[in-house]
Amino acid sequence: MALADLHTKIDLQNSSQLSSLSTRLSYNRRISLRPLPQPHNSRICCSVTSKEVQAPVTVNTEEPKKKPDCYGIFCLTYDLMAGEETKSWKKLINIAISGAAGMISNHLLFKLASGEVFGPDQPIALKLLGSERSFEALEGVAMELEDSLFPLLREVSIGIDAYEVFQDADWALLIGAKPRGPGMERADLLDINGQIFAEQGKALNAVASRNVKVIVVGNPCNTNALICLKNAPDIPAKNFHALTRLDENRAKCQLALKAGVFYDKVSNVTIWGNHSTTQVPDFLNAKINGIPVKEVIKDTKWLEEEFTEMVQKRGGVLIKKWGRSSAASTAVSVVDAIRSLVTPTPEGDWISSGVYTAGNPYGIAEDIVFSMPCRSKGDGDYELVKDVIIDDYLRSRIKMTEAELLAEKRCVAHLTGEGIAVCDLPGDTMLPGEM
Ligand code: LMR
């Protein structure tokens, strides 16, 4: 950003205001400012509060090491106070996203910035985490965000150090993970990705908001979420989610298709367990037009076999067709998952999320991340739905996915602080995309 451009954006009243602003800008972008000729009706137009402006400030010319750079236009241009007054905008929230240069993020970021996720009165800051290899791509993403002129998007920063990028994060959407490569055992995948999520858990623990909400998307997402929360002991375990909303959406679509109704008529769909081919899409408690699915779709064999397998393996079938993993629908399901936590769940309905199993009413093993039915009051938190019926069929399926998650947990014990890892994975179970 040229200095001339800065001059058109910023009116400076006096040298102490200049000092304050100069501190902030040099901190972010190493731009030095000279005093401007004093304009009439001048005011600061930047993200500083009046308190900051009035306080005597010592200009710090040294670049602080611990914060990520803001990107381009997002370093300088908004008048938060005027925005607050005229639009009653809420307090800015920080959203950190890992794997930010990837395909899922590319769909997700623009939804977040448009206001469709957190609402039209919620300004946001996007903190994008990439890798050294993806840094240029990350800059490209930030450029596209600049060019989109989203009024709610107040700050964008990019970086490759989780300890910088996760600073003060209110939400952390952990998308980046390595896909399983040729010849790689599932245990290797658990280890490689587990290390990423252990490190990110530590970073969240050190620098994120104490009430950060974390949604783990990178696979194997349940166990990654478990590793992450175990490495973040100062953040409530309840705040960590593994994304199974995509599976819920897939299940709703297939039930709607079979029943010949549009998918808005399908409710109360639970995905139980792991985001893998052992997951259990629950048709016993699901409803179509408020009526139990089994009364609408009488073909039990279809429900138990075809439907169940279709949902479990949807990701893999899609990869075969598309040549890569689902990205757009995953991003949509992340949006759905967040919105389900920041808006009240419709009366009588619920949503699925992979959550920490402390004190669950279904007899599912404690201390794993397991997808279950949840409800939210819209405050970012959730409670488990406690009165879902479990029959013998469901119970036997739930046991299989639970066994898989327990085995995954044993396999990452070295990353959760629980001793030596023992990998006795049942068969070689798959992520939906690995078939
Ligand atoms: C999906 O369900 O589409 C993905 O989790 C597949 C994958 O393994 O990337």
Image: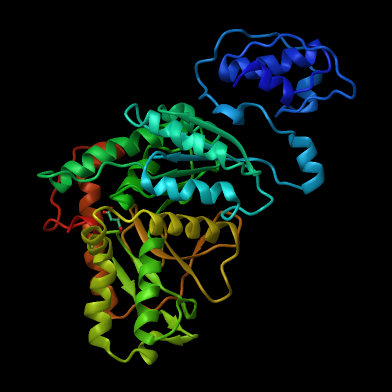
Residue 400 in sight in this render: yes
Number of dots carrying numbers: 0
Residue drawn 52% across and 48% down? 110
Q: Quadrant of the N terminus?
A: top right
Residue drawn 73% across and 12% down? 19
Residue 208 horizontal/vertical position (percent):
51, 35
Residue drawn 24% across and 56% down? 433
Residue drawn 48% across and 81% down? 265
- Residue nearer the viewer, 320 or 349: 320
- Residue nearer the viewer, 396 or 176: 176
**Is 397 situated above or below 103?**
below
How is the rendered protein coloured?
A: rainbow
Question: Is 395 placed left or right of 45 in the picture?
Answer: left
Q: Residue furthest right?
A: 40
Quarter occupied by residue 293? bottom left
Residue 184 horizontal/vertical position (percent):
13, 43
- Residue nearer the viewer, 41 or 108: 41
Residue 167 horizontal/vertical position (percent):
52, 31
Residue 356 in sight in this render: no
Quarter occupied by residue 228? top left
**Is 408 situated above or below 391?**
above
Question: Is 388 placed left or right of 178 in the picture?
Answer: right
Quarter occupied by residue 381? bottom right
Q: Quadrant of the C terminus?
A: bottom left
Q: Quadrant of ligand 1?
A: bottom left
Question: Is 159 placed left or right of 187 in the picture?
Answer: right
Residue 267 horizontal/vertical position (percent):
47, 77
